[in-house]
Image (spheres, rainbow, N blue to C red):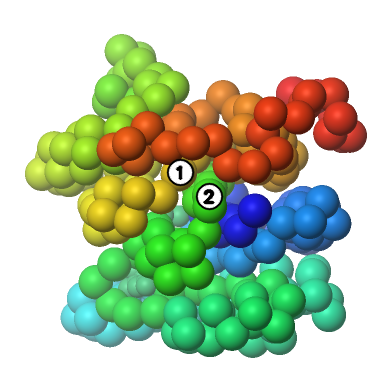
Amino acid sequence: MNVVVSVGGSVLSPGDPERVAAHAAVIEALRDAGHEVSVVVGGGATALEYIGVARELGANEMKLDEIGIAATRLNARLLIEALGDAAVQTPPETYEGAGEALRRGEVAVMGGVAPAQTTDAVSAALAEYVDADLLVYGTSVAGVYTADPNETDDAEHIPELSAADLVERIAGIEMNAGAAAPVDLLAAKVIQRSGLRTIVLDGTDPERIRRAVLTGEHEGTDVLPANGGADPDGWDADSAAVDGPDE
Ligand code: UTP
């Protein structure tokens, strides 16, 4: 299948080469299994640090976003190095560029593209652009919850919801300043309009991303299109056929 993997900057952990290499190994394993893979990488701690310093220096929001985009592309370059020749050697700055890489059989690793959004939206837009069968968000939380699990013990995990429910839920969260949304509102809206089959999961262990793409099994949240969405090809296969450690 054609899959877009969104790797949160906090999940990639640029300070930890083994973690970056582990994410690259999962992308290679998915390609070895016959899947087409494109990747989007977030800014994580690097973006936060630079944005924080620039804000204190008086930079406006537009400039802060440009700094954030630069940080996402820096992180993308680490994953590119770990992937070696399989990857386009610079992060494509447009969806067209990433799409061309896919047609050449290469892995595009994108960062951000434009201010006033995050890489959540880039991932959804790229998935729509390349007509992906599946979009997987590897984030630092284990899917979608009824509330922010870092803020309240009452937060309940939601294993499955419709794209319309996701939009509604995130619109509510984003009106509460400071509350963390699992993906941003623009991303949710693109997921809804495109009917993208989407999984949000804890990507700190990249093995979970591999298992989710190969088998459809995960402990995160399935976001289903309005028509319910058929399972992508290959998910019927016995998950025992997938080698690698069990969760
Ligand atoms: P991230 O996508 O890492 O945002 O981009 P985030 O929400 O802080 O991180 P996650 O989703 O929790 O991992 C870092 C910053 O880069 C800018 C924004 O300022 C964002 O906060 N950015 C990123 C853009 O302006 N446009 C983009 O397309 C991507």
State whether residue 239 appears in this view. yes
Above or below 190: residue 139? above
> CB atoms at circles 1 and 2 under 8 Å apart?
yes
Count neighbours of disc 1 (C-alpha within 10 A) and say few if under 14, some if 14 to 19, many if 20 or more: many
Front residue (pair 55, 125): 125
Dividing the picture into quadrants, the one containing residue 103 is bottom right
Q: Point out the tag, 1 or 2, that comes first from the N-terminus.
A: 2
Dividing the picture into quadrants, the one containing residue 17 is bottom right
Residue 200 spot, x, y in % from top left: 47, 39
Q: Which mark is residue 134?
A: 2
Kind of element beneath mark 2: strand
Residue 95 spot, x, y in % from top left: 46, 79
Left or right of 198, for residue 178 = left
Left or right of 51, for residue 5 = right
Q: In which quarter of the image is ligand 1?
A: bottom left
Front residue (pair 234, 62): 234
Above or below 218: residue 21? below
Front residue (pair 49, 24): 24
Left or right of 112, for residue 65 = left
Residue appearing at x 54%, y 35% in the figure: 231
